[in-house]
Amino acid sequence: MAANDGEEEATVSLVDVLEEDEELENEASAVLGGSDSEKCSYPEGYVKRQALYACNTCTPKGGEPAGICLACSYKCHEGHDLFELYTKRNFRCDCGNDKFGEMECKLFADKEKVNSGNKYSHNFFGLYCTCDRPYPDPEDEVPDEMIQCIVCEDWFHGRHLGCVVPDCVELQEMICESCMNKTPFLWNYAAHIAVPAITKVSQCKGEEDVKVEVENDEEEKKIKNENPKSPVEEKVQVNGTSACKRKHQEETEGSSEEGSCSGCRLREMKSSGKSRTLQGAVFWPSAWRTKLCTCTDCKVLYADAGVSFLTDEMDTVLAYENKGKSTEQAEQAGGAEGRDPLMSALNNLNRVQQLEIIHEYNDMKTELKDYLQRFAAEGKVVTPEDIRQFFEQQQSRKRRRANAGQYYCS
């Protein structure tokens, strides 16, 4: 904080600004770098993971939801009101199909009427979370982060997850409570390998954080006394429904299937007697997917629940982003111009004009970096006046170069 005429004004250091800018640039490059910005992804079928958009101009709320690929967002929907959906798995570009009426895709017009394998949600109309609100929300005055569930791929406000968001959340994957309840066997894994549960109890005014114990011995004893069954059936009942008495899918987790697979990690976890409250979203540590059992019976379990992708380490957003970074680095190393919009614009200029613009840009970038580093070294805050002064100096030097006849001639 910095004092100014008796009033406090919020400030940030130059280092904070530079680091945040670099982080956002790297994130954007990673997301877009994993998708093709020149060709429609439709011919590739249901792409494993890609950057997607929804066009509020062509498919507004009240109609059918539709998603378009990165290239179509540039070529076919330029100037339209678009919702950025980040990435989604197993999706085929809808641009120009029956959902868009008479409009045809400019990049790949020969498309089926609908993509029956696509999955849609309220995200395609710019709405998110259990509160079904847009993001950013002009009516929401509470500063909060949005976190994506890796199963349903919806985005949730941290305060609406039913738990306290742990530190270093960017290093973890999250599964919302609704998806956990639809795949109840994951609660067994959660008791052993997930981040310890901390639930949040909402009140009329404010919220109170309440830490929840992982073990529920008293509840287990109560269930065992009320439901005298075989040892195997008891363990399934106790560990699956100790807090909320939810029933597991007996057809996939019954005692007959447990006995048919030796060395099953899931069965061992159930047998341990360890459980946790079945409430709130669950955060998983890095590389947690490698700890999931992949025996024959468990593979059937994942398939029946529609979550076979959980056993694929390359399904993660992190793997997709790393692919985008690798692609970008390879293009830079090979001297390629890449898919940057600026480079695409330069293609329309002759070689002399290209060199002139690149030369000027690199000069300004170097000079701005040197100028700002002086503030960083002295620990000073950069003011709007400082920035104006820098560009005034740039304009002055530019005029001097022009008067000296130092521009290239075309």
Image (tube, rainbow, N blue to C red):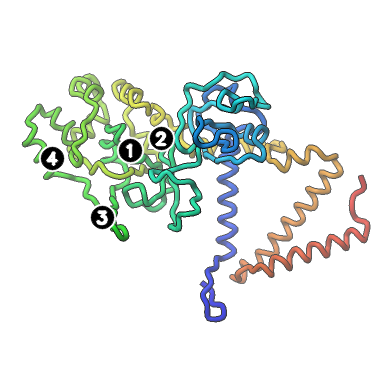
Crowd class of label 1 (few under 14; some 14 to 19; many from 20; radius 10 Å): some
Who's the residue at 25% across and 36% down the image?
188
Q: Where on the picture, by quarter, is residue 375?
A: bottom right
Q: Looking at the image, is 341 positioned above or below residue 294?
A: below
Cβ atoms at labels 4 and 2 below 8 Å apart:
no
Q: Looking at the image, is 303 positioned above or below residue 286?
A: above
Q: Residue 373 at what x, y percent from top left?
A: 65, 64
What residue does disc 2 label?
A: 152
Query: What residue occupies the far front of the structure in this picture?
Result: 62
Q: Amino acid at mark 2?
A: Cys
**How many numbered dots are placed on residues in this image?**
4
Q: Residue 296 at what x, y percent from top left?
A: 31, 20
Cβ atoms at labels 2 and 1 below 8 Å apart:
yes
- Tell me: 242 left or right of 286: left
In this rendering, the label closer to the viewer, 1 or 3: 1
Who's the residue at 90% across and 49% down the image?
408
Judge by depth and name the residue closer to the eye, 196 or 140.
Answer: 140
User: Which comes before the other along the chain, label 2 or label 1?
Assistant: 2
Q: Residue 378 at what x, y percent from top left?
A: 61, 71
Q: Is residue 325 visible?
A: no
User: Which comes before the other along the chain, label 1 or label 4?
Assistant: 1
- Label 3, label 4: how many angstroms apart (C-alpha)? 21 Å
Crowd class of label 2 (few under 14; some 14 to 19; many from 20; radius 10 Å): some
Query: What residue occupies the far bottom of the structure in this picture?
Result: 6
What residue does disc 1 label?
A: 178
Q: Amino acid at mark 1?
A: Ser
What residue does disc 3 label?
A: 210
- Label 2, label 1: how many angstroms apart (C-alpha)? 9 Å
Cβ atoms at labels 2 and 3 below 8 Å apart:
no
Q: Secondary structure at mark 2?
A: loop
Judge by depth and name the residue closer to the eye, 173 or 67.
Answer: 67
What residue does disc 4 label?
A: 220
